[in-house]
Amino acid sequence: MNEIEVTDLRDAVRRLCADFPGAYWRALDRERAYPTDFVQALTRAGWLSVLIPEAYGGAGLGLGAATAILEEIHRSGCNGGACHAQMYTMGTLLKHGSERQKEAYLPKIAAGELRLQAFGVTEPTAGTDTTRISTFARREGDKYVVNGQKIWISRAEHSDLMVLLCRTTAREDAKKPSDGMSVLLVDMRAAVGRGLTIRPIRTMLNHATTELFFDNLEVPVENLIGVEGQGFKYILDGMNAERVLIAAECIGDGRFFIDRASAYAKDRKVFGRATGENQGVQFPIARAYVQLCAAALMVEKAAALFDAGLPCGAEANMAKLLASEASWYAADQCIQTYGGFGFAEEYDIERKFRETRLYQVAPISTNLILSHVATHVLGMPKSF
Ligand SMILES: Cc1cc2nc3c(=O)[nH]c(=O)nc-3n(C[C@H](O)[C@H](O)[C@H](O)COP(=O)(O)OP(=O)(O)OC[C@H]3O[C@@H](n4cnc5c(N)ncnc54)[C@H](O)[C@@H]3O)c2cc1C
């Protein structure tokens, strides 16, 4: 996309978001309710299927365009967390699925007829150490029988399909700890009540996240993605796109906070003048802006590498770390600039403050990114 096309795209996303103002999000936040209308509007406009190739009915755009969409959503005060996975989870299917699977699912996902919004990796006992997952898919003839438990699986109640990582060989029987895991595409409509139970988790932000319990859930063997036992690699493959897109959401959040803080500081009069006339108020906002601009460059670089088909693991991770820290700093300074009013629901600052905090923990925590950079980029010894 050229610069004019990206500007047009950003304008169009902003126009759509204008129909979903703070009051819309505050009402949902109170109830921890899902933004169905917002997600449907994005789907109808085609913004969630931009990464699907044209051959399967999508726009066939790159990660650069997708980052612009999520950044604008977040800058507008909306939250893409309710649906961002619809953009990238299909990447596992696109990259590793069979032609039959791609033809069966991708055009329907692109058309908004199927929601592939759920991505089931994390387990309560394994935590970040994914090779310790124990949810097990046992092969029985033409089906897998799945037993186990997942945690923090977002949007499971609002998704028709889920990409599920489970073990098909026990860790102790596999050649390497990362072998013996497989990816299944679970049809949630068929699964709920027939071996799959979903339990919502109420969290400090409105994120529709859940716990999943598998009790002899049957999944047809034809829903295996790629080769049995190779699933860990497939999941890792998809993570770079996820990290870059989440980083773009953080950039959008950061811009939201900086827009709001600088406007408020110009307007709010205390001691007979605008608070923003004081350097003690100006400088933290300016610093937030400087940090955010630097982080945005790393997001841009990671997206460009990804779109060029080049390795981008380090850049995707660094983009996520820098952007999540920059948005958090901006959030903190924005609350400080607003003073007491920053804590009042009606200004949306405290809501966005809670929302943006997530991204230093999920989808990967800051320490794990530092560990990746230390060992994979700088060649220091592995600590685990
Ligand atoms: C709202 C929400 C939504 C989520 N959505 C999804 C989803 O849709 N699908 C999904 O699969 N998962 C999801 N997750 C899970 C998320 O990816 C994990 O929470 C995240 O990766 C951190 O893992 P953990 O919570 O198990 O932390 P743990 O692994 O228990 O780690 C806890 C803390 O210890 C630190 N730590 C752990 N080991 C080390 C070490 N060796 N060195 C230094 N520090 C270490 C970590 O950095 C972390 O800060 C979600 C989580 C949340 C909170």
Image: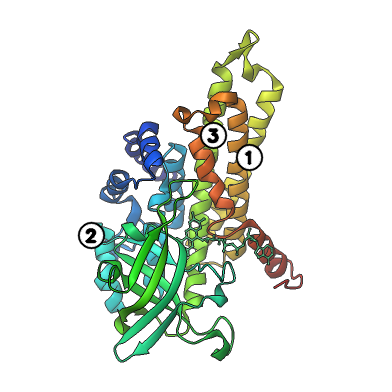
Front residue of this view, candidates 344 and 59 = 344
Q: Earlier in the sequence, mark 1 or mark 3?
A: 3
* Label annotation for residue 113: 2
Residue 287 seen in the figure: yes
Q: Is residue 384 above or below residue 259?
A: below
At label 1, which amino acid type do we have?
Tyr
In the shown orientation, is residue 353 left or right of residue 367?
Answer: left
Q: In the rendering, at what x and y percent does residue 110 appear? A: 28, 60
At label 3, which amino acid type do we have?
Phe
Circles 1, 3 touching at the beta carbon (< 8 Å): no
Please, what secondary structure does the residue beneath circle 3 have?
Answer: helix
Ligand 1, what quadrant? bottom right
Q: Earlier in the sequence, mark 3 or mark 2?
A: 2
Circle 1 Cα neighbour tier, 10 Å, few/some/many (<14 / 14–19 / ≥20): many
The image quadrant where one finds the C terminus is bottom right
Residue shown at the point (59%, 86%) measured from the top left: 176
Q: In the rendering, at what x and y percent does residue 325 appear? A: 62, 47
Q: Which residue is mark 1?
A: 329
Please, what secondary structure does the residue beneath circle 1 have?
Answer: helix
Q: Is mark 3 within 8 Å of ligand 1?
A: no
Q: In the rendering, at what x and y percent does residue 247 appear? A: 53, 51
Question: Separation of disc 1 and disc 3 at Cα?
Answer: 9 Å
In the shown orientation, is residue 11 left or right of residue 345?
Answer: left
Report the residue that reaches farthest toward the top.
272
Please, what secondary structure does the residue beneath circle 2 have?
Answer: loop
Q: Which residue is mark 3?
A: 257
Q: Earlier in the sequence, mark 2 or mark 1?
A: 2
Front residue of this view, candidates 352 and 301 = 352
Q: In the rendering, at what x and y percent does residue 164 appear? A: 41, 72
Front residue of this view, candidates 364 and 234 = 364
Residue 2 seen in the figure: no
* Label annotation for residue 21: none
